[in-house]
Amino acid sequence: MRSQVKVEPLRLDEIRLVAGVDASYHQGMIFAAAILFKFPSQEIVDQTVADMPLEFPYIPGLLSFREAPAILTALAQLSKSPDVLIVDGHGFAHPRRFGLACHLGVWLDLPSIGCAKSILVGEHAPLGSEAGSSAQLTTKGEVLGVALRTRRNVKPVYLSIGHRVDLESAVEVILASGKGYRLPEPTRQAHFLAKEARQFKV
């Protein structure tokens, strides 16, 4: 599926709805949350949770096969389809150059962005301390993504292409999706919703 990834600019003025997704685990179950936001106001339009037994073991680099079924179920339950999907995970910045954001984007044929909290592969030069500072994430001269500081003096996030987006567009979308926190609001809220669903199920 890696060969099906498309890299193309994304016009922000054509984006109306953005969805964020994240997943949480507990006692052999996975809880996936999808939250739909108006863009760029960040007003919540809809939110869903899907839970199911974990059927795929934890294998480094194959997170897609573990999380995608539940995330796809949660996305399918949304009342409207998003124009862009923000994934709490990697896209192209992956050892196989095909992380969860790529997998979901290609499967749904939807513009998607990987926004991760840590580096899976690659390195970057030091960033400035101001919000909006960025540096290319590279390995052996290959550009994998971007390290982006979304809040002053706070650790950066790591963006990479999922599908039907380019790095410049990804940076613009993530910066426009923030509310003063390190993480963009769609995945930040999806994280809380998935965690809440897990606790409620206990």
Image (spheres, rainbow, N blue to C red):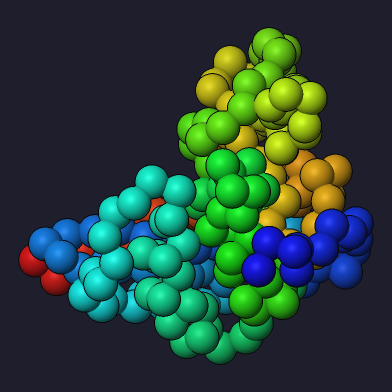
The spot of residue 136 in percent (x, y) is 76, 27
Left-right relation of 48 to 138? left
Residue name at image x 58 percent, y 44 percent: 94
The spot of residue 124 in percent (x, y) is 68, 19
The image shows residue 76, relative to residue 173, as above or below, that is below
Placement of the N terminus among the 4 image quadrants: bottom right
Query: Quadrant of residue 179 in the image?
Result: top right
The image shows residue 89, relative to residue 77, as above or below, that is above
In the depicted view, which residue is nearer to us: 103 or 180? 103
The spot of residue 165 in percent (x, y) is 81, 58
The spot of residue 18 in percent (x, y) is 66, 66
In the depicted view, which residue is nearer to us: 163 or 21? 163
- Examine the rendering and report whether any part of residue 164 can be seen: yes
Residue name at image x 50 percent, y 51 percent: 88
Residue name at image x 11 percent, y 62 percent: 27
Placement of the C terminus among the 4 image quadrants: bottom left
Residue name at image x 54 percent, y 21 percent: 154
- Examine the rendering and report whether any part of residue 82 can be seen: no
Query: Quadrant of residue 157 in the image?
Result: top right
Please state the total of marks drawn on the protein image.
0
Query: Quadrant of residue 48 in the image?
Result: bottom left
In the depicted view, which residue is nearer to us: 38 or 9? 9
